[in-house]
Image: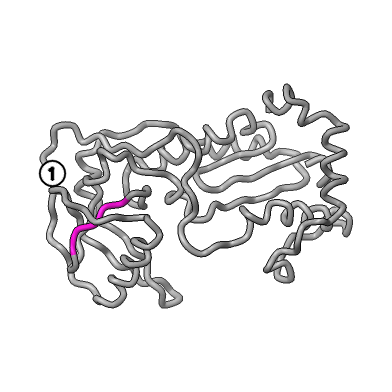
Amino acid sequence: MQILSLNGELERARVAEWIATLKKGDAAPLSNEDNLDIGDMEAADKDLVIALLRQYADIVEKKQGCPPLAKVNVEHHINTGNTAPIMLRRRRHAVSENLLIVDEMLSNKVIEPGEGAWGFPVVIVRKKDGSVRFCIDYRSLNAVTVKDLYPLPRVDETLEALHESQRFTSLDLHSGYWQLAVAKEDRAKIAFTTRRELFQFLRMPFGLCNAPSTFQRLMDCVLRGLTWVCCLVYLDDVVIFTKGTVAQQ
């Protein structure tokens, strides 16, 4: 927030100019604009929100594949001390489902072939809609990992910060964990076993004990100066709040 102020980005005239540019409506409509549920607000406010979404369509429209890496100096590290490598026995799964998910992650550069001495079993979890969630059983790895004690926000303080706010914008990151790289020296430690071969993650997967702390550190870095002033963040969930109108927000 201080940087924005120093650069003049928050001056009333600059903000008014930016809003006027949005209202011109030069940007192309979103592909899913007819299905947008913006909420109950005045027509002028709703038009302004749609114009804002159009202006940043490159980050709000859903895309196929893996999102790009975050452009900040944060990587996920796994400190296991002097623990010897752990290689656990592979579990049996439906081959077609397993290979389909692995091939998709390979094409999106989420994983790569592994050659290390670590390996953990895949766990396929069936969702209510019939689709599957590809998980890795990292319990043995977590047991020997030095814990990262980076703090997560307190719920009570979060609720206090939202007091008397009138409008809220909720943002949920697409494949948030996959926007963060795993340190090169630690990738072998999160390898998983399949019938085909051993693979290891390039992006941070779910199931690691320190993943929430690493991701919160990333988000605090990205939104530094804005959190607790106009937005709050808990892992990959962000809420923007204001006590004024949409234009003020």
Q: In which quarter of the image is the C terminus?
A: top right
Three-letter code, disc 1: Pro
Q: In which quarter of the image is the N terminus?
A: top right
Quick one: label 1, few (<14), some, or many (20+) residues within 10 Å? few
Taking depth in this image into account, of 200 and 219 the one nearest to the observer is 200
Whether the magenta-drawn stretch holds residue 91 is answered as: no
In which image quadrant can residue 151 be found?
top left
Taking depth in this image into account, of 207 and 95 the one nearest to the observer is 95
Looking at the image, which residue is at 37% across and 63% down? Answer: 107
Q: Is residue 167 above or below residue 5?
A: below
Looking at the image, which residue is at 12% across and 60% down? Answer: 89
Label 1: which secondary element: loop
Residue numbers of the magenta segment:
197-201
Residue corresponding to mark 1: 85
Looking at the image, which residue is at 34% across and 43% down? Answer: 182
Coordinates of residue 129 in the picture (x, y in percent): 45, 76
Coordinates of residue 7 in the picture (x, y in percent): 73, 25
